[in-house]
Each structure stands twice: as structure tokens, then as C-alpha cells.
Image (tube, helix red, strand yellow):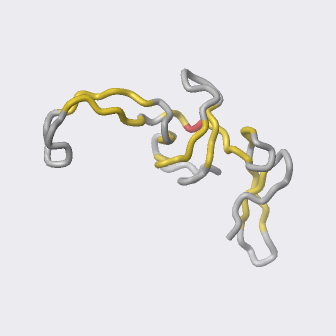
């Protein structure tokens, strides 16, 4: 069963632990079943690839690997640091994410 997380694709996050601690990047993919995220330019590894239709030359490529969702925090633009997120329910019934440090609304729909 997939778990509900407060971070989404295209959010800016900061890595809080591990070999890439302190790095910032945009979330490329969220795997809710496994509890993993792929962050741009974080946890980059080298892989040896055989030639295939997508990569006709083959060779060594660098790609981002998933990291646990608990190892990243949302990056608030106003606070300029990793923060926790909360939900506010508006009068019309829509949920809106907000920064728990400064109260800034994250979703500007």
C-alpha cells in the first residue's frame, strides 16, 4: 500500500543525512510504495551500459539513484533551509501545504 507523503515531484529539497548531506536539488520522481525519491544531482553513481537502442554507444554513464524519503527535507524559499510541512484546509475544502517554521504557503495554485 502506498503511503501519503507531503513532498511531491518538482519540489526543491535538501539532503539531511548521508554522503550527499547538504546538497540541494529538485525531485525528479517519488516512489510512494518503496518510500524513495530521486533527486537531481544527488546520489549519482556510474553504471556500465551495454549498447542498446536508447544508448547505441554504450559505455559508462552517470545516473541518479533513489534515496530514502526520510533523508530529505522540503526547502522553504523564505527560510532558505530544510523545513517540515503541514496542511491547512481552506474554506472551500482544498488542502494547502505550508512551512511549519515561517507559515509561508507552499502551494500557490
Answer with left or right where residue 82 lies relative to residue 53: right
As drawn, the residue found furthest toward the right would be: 102
Residue 64 placement: quadrant? top left
Say how many tags the image has: 0
As drawn, the residue found furthest toward the top would be: 19
Answer with left or right where residue 28 lies relative to residue 15: left
40 or 9, which is in the foreground?
A: 40
Residue 54 x, y percent position in the rendering? 20, 48
Question: Is 9 placed above or below 43 here?
Answer: below
Quarter containing the C terminus: bottom right
Q: Is residue 71 visible?
A: no
71 or 49, which is in the foreground?
A: 49
Q: Is residue 44 visible?
A: yes
Residue 82 placement: quadrant? top right
As drawn, the residue found furthest toward the bottom would be: 92
User: What residue lies at 64% left-to-right and 37% top-to-bottom?
Assistant: 14
User: What residue lies at 41% left-to-right and 34% top-to-bottom?
Assistant: 65
Answer with left or right where residue 20 lies relative to residue 63: right
Answer with left or right where residue 71 lies relative to residue 62: right
User: What residue lies at 33% left-to-right and 27% top-to-bottom?
Assistant: 46
Question: Is 35 placed above or below 4 here?
Answer: above
51 or 71, which is in the foreground?
A: 51
38 or 55, which is in the foreground?
A: 55
Residue 105 x, y percent position in the rendering? 78, 59
Residue 107 x, y percent position in the rendering? 69, 62
User: What residue lies at 43% left-to-right and 30% top-to-bottom?
Assistant: 44
Question: Is 99 placed above or below 91 here?
Answer: above
Residue 95 x, y percent position in the rendering? 71, 66
Amino acid at each position: 500500500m502506498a503511503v501519503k507523503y507531503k513532498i511531491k515531484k518538482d519540489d526543491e529539497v535538501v539532503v539531511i543525512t548521508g554522503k550527499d548531506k547538504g546538497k540541494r536539488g529538485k525531485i525528479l520522481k517519488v516512489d510512494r510504495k518503496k518510500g524513495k525519491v530521486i533527486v537531481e544531482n544527488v546520489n549519482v553513481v556510474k553504471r556500465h551500459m551495454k549498447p542498446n537502442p536508447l544508448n547505441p554507444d554504450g559505455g559508462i554513464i552517470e545516473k541518479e539513484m533513489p534515496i530514502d524519503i526520510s533523508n530529505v527535507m522540503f526547502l522553504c524559499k523564505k527560510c532558505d533551509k530544510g523545513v517540515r510541512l503541514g496542511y491547512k484546509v481552506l474554506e472551500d475544502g482544498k488542502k494547502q501545504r505550508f512551512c511549519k517554521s515561517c507559515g509561508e504557503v507552499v502551494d500557490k495554485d
